[in-house]
Amino acid sequence: GRWDHGYNLAELVRELWTVHRLILRDVVRTFSAAFPDWDSEVEEAEELVSSFFLDALVGSVEQYVENFASQLRKANESVTEANEKLSKTDISRLQLIRTVSHDLSNFLNSLTWVMSAFGHETDEAKRHKMIEVTERNLADMRALLGELTDYSVLLADQVEPDFEQISLRSLCEDLATSFSQMAKANGMRLKIQWNVDFATVRSDRRRIKQIVGNLISNAIKYRRQERAEGSIEMYFASLPSDRWQLIVKDTGIGIPGDQL
């Protein structure tokens, strides 16, 4: 109980010694002066009092050491927990940087190929469409870089999707214009379709573009090199309860069953 009131070891020893001395002087020795014939009993009483306070002191020191050791253990546990959290944060930060770098790379690659095609395109309508797609891709890149500056939100996985009602025709044309040239330059034919009875989806356009870019990038990376040309097919299909799915098929090497 003393430790809960802020006692330290030196204060406790001093307190016990003071009480010990007062008892011997004011009680035992006063009794001895009053009854000199009881010297042997007084001497025994002094030994008992001294023994009691010695035991109390030893017990208090042991309790102090035990409490101190307990505090050290708790401090070590806190330090260990803090280090684990820092380690997890570092891992999350590295994963975040890899993910964002990969997405930025996909956007940059698509921009490169769109602008390359733009230089050879003579149809003004197609050139205008390429400019629109390029502007959207640049805006997406700016938004992605903006998110990267806010580690606290990203690491806490608190990025809110920007939901909107999206025309599938417009979305698929945008995706095809953004990624067809990149796929073609790497020996892949890209085909993006949707169910004609499925006109719109409610989602985050930029997130869809990031996902599609990653899928195309992986299809290119893991294509079968022995084939002269590969293909990537994507199909937006509706599901019950206002849900939808993106079906993807490519001619790559695939993922082993034990890794699915």
Image: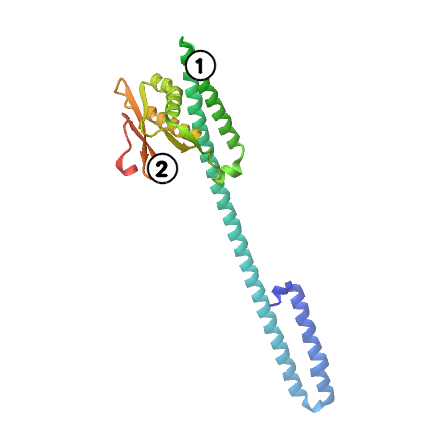
Crowd around label 1: few <14 · some 14–19 · many ≥20 (10 Å):
few
105 over 24 or under it: above or below: above
What is the x, y in percent for residue 150?
53, 35
Estimate the x, y position of residue 181 in percent, counting from the top left: 37, 17
Decide: is 159 above or below 37. above
* Mark 2: amino acid: Asp
Q: Quadrant of the N terminus?
A: bottom right
Query: Residue 11's image quarter?
Result: bottom right
Mark 2 lies on residue: 242
Q: Residue at x 41, y 29 (%)?
A: 166
Secondary element at tag 2: loop
Helix, strand or loop at label 1? It is: helix
Identify the residue shown where x is 37% and y is 24%: 169
Say which of 246 and 260 sits in front: 246
Q: Position of residue 207 (x, y in %)?
A: 43, 31
The extreme bottom residue here reads 37
Measure the alpha-carbon separation of dots 2 and 1.
Answer: 34 Å
Q: Amino acid at mark 1?
A: His
Report the colour scheme. rainbow
Corner quadrant of residue 72: bottom right
What residue does disc 1 label? 128
